[in-house]
Image: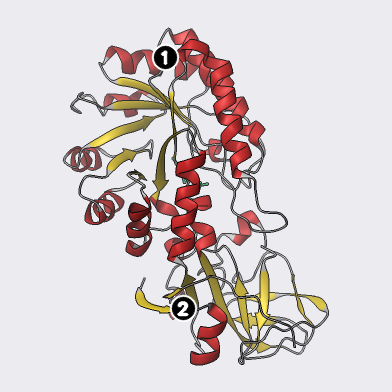
């Protein structure tokens, strides 16, 4: 992903001046830093960033300047990226499945927390130096509230988590638990249910948790009202105090999406408007819009003309295709767009910093993503 350090006022300003034909991610570092500070101020514990949401060097640098010191990494490549940005960053390796070679590489980089969800994965860590090193047992429960469920792939059921906690303690590690309520989760109750169960697992195991990592999952503002992050932070603190009482662990969180989404606006261009009303964009299901199949369409979308003004006609639902020659390259649902949308217009989609560049492919020669730094990810413009 290219990083263009020049600072332009806004996406609207940039597209009017340069009329880019390729997709552009407009990055507002100030918004990213403000979000990081919001987490640091509002969350009563250690805030780490889940690197997979967006591993761009400029993102890591801005998070570090804002005061983020810990990172959830899931692969050797992510470890190297974080180490390049901050030599002494705190690293949590919270992908619960790791090869022996990956573990050896990671040990050399001083991982301070490892998540596990089965006893074979814990055995693989037998030679990891114990000093200041934590094992975080990943719990899974049938909890709803998120866009999709992370428990489908990782996590130990409560009975198994009891055994793993004891095993980790007996091996001499510091003990912790973790969970992930599922991504784009706007319901504080999802965290509450997990916290209550984690306290119960710790009691049954007879293990005092030093920390509880409440995962990521915090929702980005994709549609409707902005999610109330502080309400979730408060609920997490209150529920932890209630469920653990005197044995309350220190809290950790590892947001990806909610940390980085709002700092980027995705700018796409209309390549064609077809006779049947469908439109073709210059990026789609193999690029920055990959995730929409699983989490649905955002509604913070505006259509902007080449002169930078907003289109404001009545809305019509349109089938939207991406640029590749694959018929799967189509958005999951029709998208409401102005009736008079035309070839050459731009779509500006807000809060697209997470899981866009990081999962985009180069399939069919598309998926290019220039990053343009802007002062603000959005400019209020009057309609035509
Ligand atoms: C992906 C992931 C996160 C971040 O999830 P978001 O929904 O983007 O906040 C945090 N922790 C773990 C272990 C993850 O795999």
According to the picture, the residue beneath numbered tag 1 turns out to be: 163
**Up-down relation of residue 43 to residue 281 (above or below):** above
Counting from the top left corner in percent of width and height, residue 347 is at 62, 78
At horizontal 52% and vertical 58% (from top left) the residue drawn is 261
Q: In this view, does 74 lie to the left or right of 162?
A: left
Say if 348 sits above or below 270 in the image. Answer: above
The residue furthest right is: 314
Res. 325 in view:
no
Where residue 291 appears, x then y in whole percent? Answer: 56, 59
Q: Residue 22 carries which label?
A: none
| Label 2 residue SS | loop
Image quadrant for the C terminus?
A: bottom right
Q: Which residue is pictured at 42% across the width and 14% down the height?
A: 163
Give SS at disc 1: helix
Crowdedness near tag 2: few (<14), some (14–19) or many (≥20) residues, C-alpha within 10 Å: some
Residue picked out by circle 2? 366
Between 361 and 59, the residue placed more toward the observer is 59
């Amino acid at each position: 992903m290219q990083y263009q350090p020049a600072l332009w006022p806004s996406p609207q300003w940039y597209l009017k001046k340069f009329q880019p034909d390729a997709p552009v991610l407009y990055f507002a570092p100030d918004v990213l830093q403000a979000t990081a500070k919001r987490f640091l101020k509002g969350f009563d514990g250690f805030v780490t960033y889940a690197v997979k949401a967006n591993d761009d060097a400029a993102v890591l640098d801005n998070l570090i300047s804002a005061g983020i010191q810990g990172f959830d990494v899931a692969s050797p490549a992510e470890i190297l990226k974080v180490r390049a940005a901050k030599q002494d960053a705190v690293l949590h390796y919270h992908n619960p499945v790791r090869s022996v070679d990956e573990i050896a590489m990671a040990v050399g980089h001083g991982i301070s927390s490892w998540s596990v969800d089965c006893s074979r994965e814990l055995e693989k860590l037998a030679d990891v130096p114990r000093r200041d090193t934590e094992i975080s047992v990943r719990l899974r429960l049938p909890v709803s509230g998120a866009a999709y469920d992370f428990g489908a792939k990782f996590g130990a059921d409560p009975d198994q988590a009891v055994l793993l906690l004891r095993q980790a303690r007996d091996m001499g590690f510091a003990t912790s638990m973790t969970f992930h309520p599922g991504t784009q989760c706007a319901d504080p109750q999802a965290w509450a249910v997990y916290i209550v169960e984690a306290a119960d697992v710790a009691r049954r195991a007879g293990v005092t948790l030093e920390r509880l990592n409440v995962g990521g999952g915090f929702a980005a503002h994709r549609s409707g009202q902005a999610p109330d992050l502080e309400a979730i932070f408060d609920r997490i603190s209150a529920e932890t105090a209630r469920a653990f009482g005197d044995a309350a662990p220190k809290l950790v969180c590892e947001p990806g999406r909610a940390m980085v989404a709002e700092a980027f606006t995705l700018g796409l261009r209309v390549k064609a408007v077809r006779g049947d009303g469908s439109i073709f964009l210059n990026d789609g299901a193999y690029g920055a819009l990959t995730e929409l199949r699983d989490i649905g369409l955002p509604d913070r979308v505006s259509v902007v003309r080449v002169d930078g003004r907003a289109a404001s006609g009545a809305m019509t639902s349109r089938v939207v295709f991406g640029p590749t020659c694959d018929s799967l390259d189509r958005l999951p649902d029709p998208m409401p767009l102005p009736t008079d949308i035309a070839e050459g217009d731009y779509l500006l989609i807000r809060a697209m910093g997470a899981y866009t560049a990081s999962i985009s492919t180069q399939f069919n020669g598309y998926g290019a993503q220039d990053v343009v730094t802007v002062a603000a990810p959005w400019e209020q413009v009057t309609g035509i």
